[in-house]
Amino acid sequence: MDHIGGYAVRPGFYDIYGATAIPGGVNFTIHSHHATGVELLLFRRTEDKPYAVLPFPAHYRIGNVYSMIVFRLDIGEFEYAYRVEGPYEPEKGLIFNREKYLLDPYAKAVTGQSLWGQPSTLGQRYKARVVKDDFDWGDNQQPLLPMEDLIIYEMHVRGYTKHGSSRVEFPGTFEGIKEKIPYLVELGVNAVELMPIFEFDEMLDYREVDGKKLYNYWGYNTVSFFSPNTSYTASKEYNREGNELKRLIHLLNAHGIEVYLDVVFNHTAEGNENGPFFSFKGFDNNIYYMLTPEGFYYNFSGCGNTLNCNHPIVQQLIVSCLRYWVTAYRVDGFRFDLASILGRNEDGSPMEKPPLLQQLAFDPILGDVKLIAEAWDAGGLYQVGKFPSWNRWAEWNGRYRDDIRRYLKGDEGAAAAAALRIAGSSDIYDPSVRENASVNFITCHDGFTLYDLYSYNEKHNESNGWDNTDGSNDNHSWNCGAEGETRDEAVNTLRRRMIRNACAVLMCSRGIPMFLAGDEFGNTQFGNNNPYCHDDEVSWLDWGLLEKNQDIFRFFKFMIQFRKEHPVLRSNISNGFGGIPDISFHGTSPWVEGFSGYDRYIGVMMAGQEDGKQPETVYIASNAYWEQLEAVLPQLPDGMEWFRAVNTWDTQVRESGPVEPGFVIPPRTVMVFCGRVKG
């Protein structure tokens, strides 16, 4: 037993990183490859000067790991940080600075971040708190839904309930979402994907433009990978940070809804040479970040730096992080932002078998979680359909979004690609090699809402303060005849039908459907396709639109239930039946080999028969032409007849009786027919 700074200490547990409460004290373990000395700093809450400084004795270091147990230390009475000494050789990427307070990379909670939009009085000196993990999960059972059954709903925690119209007791918080669980159940989604909830600092890019306060609202600038964002809680959770989020996950799971986290392992909030210095830069800058031969930061993320994901040390951090969120929070899945970066080598080149991605694919603790990649990055690496997967990774199918958008607004030459997307994108994902790999989406946080997709020809991002230069210019949107809000009833009627068309096609496509929260009731961002900085009515969901647009909500709810009731839409349940193949394509006349550049009608038929059940056939008829068309349904086997289940021309959700094979489909309309056994 030794004594340092008035505390009894001894060497700690070297394989348990971070700060961990143990009987009689706290175990602190940190590592640095190039450090020559490490000091533990203890602070009173809200104070900037440490009340105790405890240098790690030289004999407390094994390899590159420093570990120390500090006895008689109450976790409720202190916060902590580190100071690290080492060489300053920027040309080698070594920039140690003993004057900096460093946040523990394995910290379970970050202090001073709980008040949203308030600049820290301590500048960027982040400190950590020890978390007591005593949450009682009871007999919690995770849903463990099959991939093909998922319907994913993407939401921003703050924006979902911050608007006054949400009428929740705790707007903008995890508790606010909890209050909306009955709504989610009624809608029918079974997975929510939360935009970043790791601790981030919305003030890092704070600006004021025309009197408006602009923040880093989306949260794609991680400060700490193991810590929940404390500004998303309804109350302070000293030393029990994360319990509110755990209660939310527990209750969502109890209602059969899985929870996925949008995780950002491609960069950190430390930025480039001009960015803040608060954690990784001070422990091992040249290990955690990809550096040029001159010691500068590669920027494949578009955010200033790039995590060196396939270095063994960083790989260990990421794997440990995901394991933590799965074991401590029971998270059901992860969506990886700019995931192509996770497959880059230390020099930035793409790897054929990236060790990190392979490790995550086969990790035992992650065995049941969903892994979803945004299969591109800001450095130009686009891997949709080619992301290293081991038949384990799914992908955001960016080609689905673009091809379906082009087709639905009537672009010439778009029908053939759209038909393949509806049928499951087998040209991108070979079903014999990759199952359930395509996450289909038409909208997400990045870009227009579904309402805006059919209300604006151009982005309107002026309020972001970049002269409308930010955000994508390649939206494949259409305003239906008027830019923005209009009193023209014909335009508004068409817009609502286009929204129904998009919903119907999405829910009838093979693959995993995902849509943006608020699309189901016509939420708008007023033409802004990149509101990453808006903590205001641009980004907050206006729940008043739910009442105004009940017809849109009813249609979404109906289509979600329709998808659940028809397994043939979700996967290949057999190789067809009665001479009808599993998937077939049709023009206005049945059975076509392909679509010409002038075609704007698509018929996609899916057929199959589950063991012991009646055969089922679903035919999706889509007319993207501006005039009505006459079409003919394929002939069914004897004893079966067609029913029309969906007609987006009709604002009422209702099913018809039996119909004849010949039918007229109005302009810019989607119809869905079901083939059933008579009687």
Image (cartoon, rainbow, N blue to C red):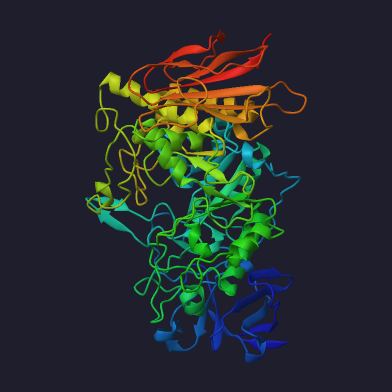
Total number of numbered discs in the rendering: 0
Give how far across and how far down residue 245 sits, in percent.
Answer: 58, 50
Residue 619 drawn above or below residue 7? above
Can you name the residue that lies furthest to the bottom here? 58
Question: Is residue 217 or residue 40 the one in the foreground?
Answer: 217
Quadrant of the rendered image containing residue 408: top left
Answer whether residue 434 is visible to the viewer in this image.
yes
Give how far across and how far down residue 526 sits, in percent.
Answer: 31, 38
Residue in the image at 60% along x and 38% along y? 150
Residue in the image at 49% along x and 38% along y? 421
Q: Is 609 positioned to the left or the right of 235 in the image?
A: right
Q: Is 42 positioned to the left or the right of 638 in the image?
A: left
Residue in the image at 51% along x and 83% along y? 84
Question: Is residue 398 or residue 433 the one in the foreground?
Answer: 433
Give how far across and how far down residue 436 sits, in percent.
Answer: 61, 43
Answer whether residue 162 is visible to the viewer in this image.
no
Residue 658 drawn above or below residue 252? above
Residue 609 drawn above or below residue 43? above
Question: Is residue 528 or residue 61 the one in the foreground?
Answer: 528
Q: Quadrant of the N terminus?
A: bottom right
Q: Quadrant of the C terminus?
A: top right
Residue in the image at 68% along x and 59% along y? 362
Residue 636 drawn above or below residue 188? above
Give how far across and how far down residue 60 sits, in percent.
Answer: 66, 86
